[in-house]
Image (cartoon, rainbow, N blue to C red):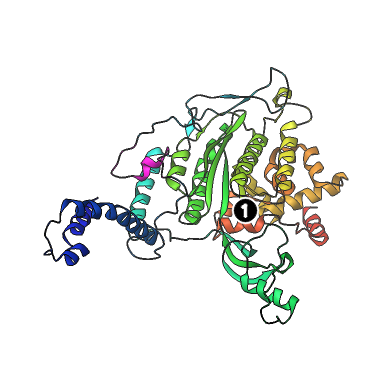
Amino acid sequence: MAMVVFGYLGWLLLNPFHFILGIPIGSILPIPIVIVLTVVYIPMIYYIVRYWLRTMTKRKSGPASGIDTVEAGPAKAEDGDQWGRASMPYKAKHKSKVIGSKSEIRDPPVDLGSEFFTKTPDLDTGEPIFDVEELKAKAMIRSKITSGGWINKRVSSRGVGSLKASETAQYGRPIRSRQPTGDLGSIDLPATIVRAIGRTGKLAPGQQLEIKSSDIREKVFTGHTPLTILLVIDVSLSMKSSRKQIRKLLERIERETRGSKDRTGIVAFKESGAIEVQAPTTNWNKIYRALSKLRISGLTPLAEAVMKSLEIIKRERMRNRDIEPLIVIISDFAPNIPLAQSVGPGHLEYTPVRDIVRAARIAKKSDVRIATVNVDPSQMNWIRFLKRPYHEALELATMLRMKKEGFDDPIETILSVHEFRQTFGAYLIAKVGGGKCFLSKELLKKDSILSEFISGAHSKSTIRSEDLKAAESYIT
């Protein structure tokens, strides 16, 4: 504000009219000229400030580097922004429609009768996962980073995403051109003209070059693209002993995504439903606010959580069809609430487990990357016993049991074996969804968690017949 005021005064006392009219510099001009100068000054200072802000956000070094990447659109204050402002208090004018103090009853997705309902989790019930004051302190520290007040920040500012793409239609640097196979991306004008000339040959004097649709070529880029990450967090009562693992995982994910264009959202599930706690955003102060709402209580509606995540991704794709979605499920993977809750959690057909298979198949059909992270410490026994990484150990165990029981399909093997059905939920979702399951303790030792998620998406089986024979020899 001071810059605008002093700039205005300087503009009035020193401007081209002093030279044109021969009036001494620093003298007050006539009122009509002052009005004209004011009208000229307003748009001029607007574009100067706007250019300055755009320049500062693109800086890679210096005290003002690292300004957070923000989303496009009008600058409206939202719930959670107050934690990113160290000097100006903020009160929400409207109550959040995402997070409420009371549970809501949602209509069933199909006509299952009046006795059926899905209860949206009550986030005010249970023990908190995160310390609210600690999250507020982190948000205040981050606000100092974005304002340039703290130079030695932990996270470097990145203007790209985490997904490395060898060929993409929108991001990175151009490496070649191609004929469009679907929706047209960025047109490569030189390649298009060369193609048209090659088709028509040498032009006669006065003849114009005609470009047909078959001549059009689009650019192919290489680089990094931003991810839309949905952190699907289990806040059921069975996760009480795993709060420390959840905090560590989210801190690592924050470290790898903050400052980039990767967008992160939060989905929580417990009781008999799932809720979107925070829509995908690059603003981690909002995510801190969402995390402070997470409290542990109730049962584990795992299939409902996957379906809720797919609903959110469908909505995000309606806004931008080119997003790269990644669902990360953090749980102990012991589902006990099915999608059709009228059958009850103890149904003989073990519906809660079959429902996560159905949900994972829908995710794969929707071309959504999926990664599962198990925080149950007892799962380390599979790694020690089979001496393999977590996903491969569970896959090898499934193959051995399938061979022993005489089954033809690994999924049906897990569903039919009681101990597998209770403990192989993470592998089951990853196997059906075309992704990979991880154990939290094993995952935290990796250099990059996101790289592990991305490389594991749509992974194929690595178990060979030689591996089965070797495992059988030392088990027996």
Packing grade of label 1 (10 A; few <14, some 14-19, many >=20) is: few
Say which of 400 and 286 sits in front. Answer: 286
Q: Give how far across and how far down residue 393 sits, in percent.
A: 71, 53
Q: Position of residue 349 (x, y in %)?
A: 79, 30
Question: 429 or 75: nearer the eye?
Answer: 75
Q: Amino acid under label 1?
A: Asp
Looking at this view, name the residue that lies furthest to the front: 206
Was residue 464 drawn as part of the magenta stretch in this picture? no
Residue 260's x, y, as percent? Answer: 49, 57
Above or below, 430 relative to 163: above
Q: Horizontally, is 459 left or right of 294 in the view?
A: right
Compared to residue 244, the image places residue 204 above or below, namely below
Residue 146 vs residue 372: left or right? left
Residue 376 in sight from this viewpoint: no
Q: Is residue 364 above or below residue 347?
A: below
Left or right: 73 as drawn, with respect to 104: left
The part of the chain drawn in magenta is: 75-90
In-image side of 460 versus 225 (left or right): right
Percent position (x, y) of residue 170?
A: 59, 61
Question: Is residue 268 visible from the viewing direction of this image?
Answer: yes
Q: Which residue is mark 1?
A: 322
Residue 450, quarter of the rendered image: bottom right
